Amino acid sequence: MEMLRGSGDISAQADLCLALTKNGESKKLDTNIKVIDLNLSVEKNRKGLELEEFNFHAIKDDENKKTTLKFTREGKPPKPKEKTINHIIEFVESKKNVKRTEIIQYITKITNYNDSSVDRILKEMLDKNLLTQSSYGLYSYTNSQQIL
């Protein structure tokens, strides 16, 4: 909305304003494919239409010169912790059995979390049965449920 405010008359003429917000960007494992998290929300709605926020991924593949949009969910964008949980699930699922150190190294590289924060998230995921631990420091994904 702030970008529309060059003149007070411009924003007053709009009955509905939508905002497209970038919530983050990541790379898929072992590829050159970028995934951009986007959120579409209603910023101004004079007509009173019931419009839900929704999230989608813009998947950009530079090798094949292809960009696709993929709907992910309705509602507010996921919180950083939820995104981290999904990154861990994706990483562990792609490798089957993963060492704790590999998970920590991957997550600290793509997020702002430190080692102890990742350890806390891993413990929560074990408690919620999202991951299993066959031996100390070796994790695998249980396909029981997913946060997002």
Image (cartoon, rainbow, N blue to C red):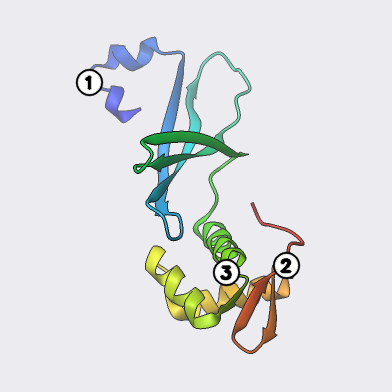
Query: In the picture provided, is 144 more to the left or to the right than 118?
Result: right
Image quarter for residue 145? bottom right
- Packing grade of label 2 (10 A; few <14, some 14-19, many >=20) is some
Tell me the element at label 2.
Answer: loop
Q: Where does residue 88 sit, x and y in percent of width and height?
A: 55, 66
Q: Which residue sits at x=52%, y=16%?
A: 46
Q: Which residue sits at x=22%, y=21%?
A: 6
Q: Pointer 1: what residue? A: 6
Query: In the picture provided, is 114 more to the left or to the right than 87?
Result: left
Q: Report the front residue among 119 and 15.
A: 119
Q: Which residue sits at x=49%, y=34%?
A: 69
| Residue type, label 2 | Thr
| Residue type, label 3 | Lys
Tell me the element at label 1.
Answer: loop
Q: Pointer 2: what residue? A: 142
Q: Can residue 66 be seen in this view?
A: yes
Image quarter for residue 128? bottom right
Q: Report the front residue among 138 and 14.
A: 138
Q: Pointer 3: what residue? A: 95
